[in-house]
Every structure is written in structure tokens, then in C-alpha cells.
Amino acid sequence: MALPKRKQSKAKSRKRRSHYKLKAPGMSLCVNCGEFKPPHRACPSCGYYKGEIYKKEEAAEEE
């Protein structure tokens, strides 16, 4: 089995690990209201997904 001849420096290790970062989540626009929403999910602001409403209106619940 191969062994390293010298200790790997902190800079070398950190350069290799520089790509281990989180990526920003993908967002898409709602076709109904234009707000940003996660893809393949109902819009959190208006409740529409693929032309159908999935979230009850808050005004209807208050009455």
C-alpha cells in the first residue's frame, strides 16, 4: 500500500475541499402570480400548481 512521503499541508487539503459547498436551491416562477417557488411544488403564496388550486384561501376560512 502506498504511503505519503510528506505531510500534506493545510492549504493543499483546503484547496481540495473548496468544492464541498452547498448549492443554492433551484427556484422557478409561478405562472399564476409570478412569485418564486420550489420546482414541482404548489406556490406558497397563491396555492396554484399546474393550473389547479391546492391551498384554501385564508379569507374563506375567516368567515
Image (spheres, grey):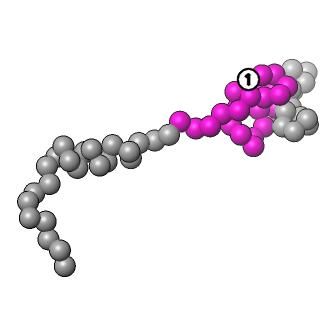
Nearest to the observer: residue 4 or residue 56? 4
Q: Quadrant of residue 15?
A: top left
Q: Is residue 26 visible?
A: yes
Residue 37 shown left or right of residue 6 in the figure:
right
Nearest to the observer: residue 46 or residue 1? 1
Span highlighted in magenta in the image? 24-47
Residue picked out by circle 1: 35
Q: Considering only vertical position in the picture, is 35 above or below 43?
A: above
Residue 48 shown left or right of residue 36 in the figure:
right
Please, what secondary structure does the residue beneath circle 1 have?
Answer: loop
- Which residue is depicted at the point 91% across and 37% down? 52
- Which residue is depicted at the point 33% across and 43% down? 18
Total number of numbered discs in the rendering: 1
Chief secondary structure of the magenta portion: loop
Is 33 covered by the magenta stretch?
yes
Q: Quadrant of the N terminus?
A: bottom left
Q: Is residue 62 visible?
A: no
**Residue 24: percent from the left, percent from the top?**
53, 36
